[in-house]
Image (cartoon, rainbow, N blue to C red):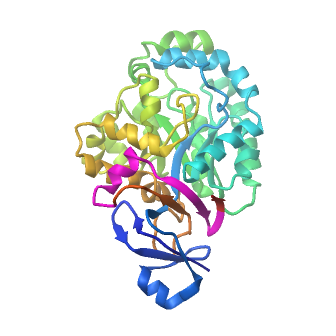
Amino acid sequence: MQILLADAIFTPDAILRDHGIVFEKTILEIAPNDLLRETYGSHCQELGAGSILMSGLINSHVHLEFSANQSTLIYGGFMPWLSSVISSRDDLINGCDDECMERAIQSMLEKGITAFGAVSSYGFDLSACSNAPQKVVFFNELIGSDPKMADALYADFQERLFTSQAIKREGFHSAVAIHSPYSVHRVIIQKALKYAKENHLRVTAHFMESSSERTWLDTNSGDFKPFFENFLKQTQAANTAREFLTYFRDVPTLFTHVIHATADELEQIHDGGHTVIHCPISNRLLGNGIIDLARLHSNNIRWVCGTDGLSSNYALDLFEEMKIALFMHHSLDLLTLSHQLWRSVTCDAANALGLNCGTIAPSFDADILVARIHYPINDQLPIHLLLRPPHIESVYILGDKVKGD
């Protein structure tokens, strides 16, 4: 049993001054420091001035297999970026071995990320993720819109999924990713979702990231048309957007981006109990626009924050991601948005991913950050923690210290 006494416990909903935590694998007790000193005496660890206890952060969406990218890919527009990914894919994949992905995982740990959702296109990141100190939801991605290749594509996906399901370690969860409505044939989407539902697997998918996707799905034209004709010999979209969402009706899903969704599609997302993953830096670098968070709020749709991968970001840092979002959504109330952003990387993300963490409260897993600030604690702490990120001194996952100064 460990007892940490801090200047404050910070959660998205409260700032508890002069409070501490008692924990083993899970959190056992939260109480004022004086009460904990009286009860536990010398077993208490005094963290001192400027110390803050926070829940570990959760990165809901990351692609580790492209972590070798630094300046290879083209930013500024979705189609130029996609073309550069295709032309450089082999070099980037071959340039990122286990050590490369382990560095990316370690960089997340240094920034307080204690759980992440890894979208795996090829399964090359399985070893790094299975050995990661963090909790991992490992989304095996299904992709392929050619009906003639459907059986082979599904067999490859199934092999990767079964391999990941053979990993047995606490905190590692196999899951399913459907790449997008334009890139996966309806037959194999429905097969994969049936398997996910029967086996209680978590599911994610990209949806309405770019205006090019919107035009292609609606009219079979636009920027995607030459891409599909030249690369895949297709003249029609694999699905309509509405059809695509109906496949997920009974499978709560994390839909990433959702920038160009219509009102009807947002209603479908709400009715399905789905979650939206917001990746602000990726959206800006690929020129995809800004998601309307007010529309999500008005539709009562939960949203969480993710970094996406280093193919469309410069860091896997949720502090940076939240800060960018704070400025990007300039019409929203600053303090209210700050609270929402903190929820998006803690309790809301945990709920969406089906993890027993993201909350500092009894019975939740002891995934805890010991952080240090050098400025006064007040009601605007949710803002200041983004403008002046704290130094993370220690990281606990399931009660074990996995990083410490």
Could you tell me residue 404's position as x and y percent? Answer: 63, 59
In this view, 345 is above or below 288: below
**Closest to the observer: 334 or 405?**
405
- Which residue corresponds to the image point at 73% horizontal and 42% vertical from the top-left? 160
Could you tell me residue 67's position as x and y percent? Answer: 65, 33
- Which residue corresponds to the image point at 57% horizontal and 74% vertical from the top-left? 26
Query: Is 380 colored magenta in this rendering?
Result: yes
Does residue 215 appear in the picture of this structure? yes
| Furthest residue in direction bottom, as rendered | 39
Quadrant in the picture for residue 92? top right
Query: Is 391 colored magenta in this rendering?
Result: yes
Quadrant in the picture for residue 243? top left
Could you tell me residue 195's position as x and y percent? Answer: 63, 50
**Closest to the observer: 357 or 33?**
33
Which quadrant, please, contains the N terminus?
A: bottom right
Which quadrant, please, contains the C terminus?
A: bottom right
Q: Which residues are magenta?
A: 377-401
In this view, 286 is above or below 243: above
What is the tally of numbered marks visible in this picture?
0
In this view, 169 is above or below 303: below
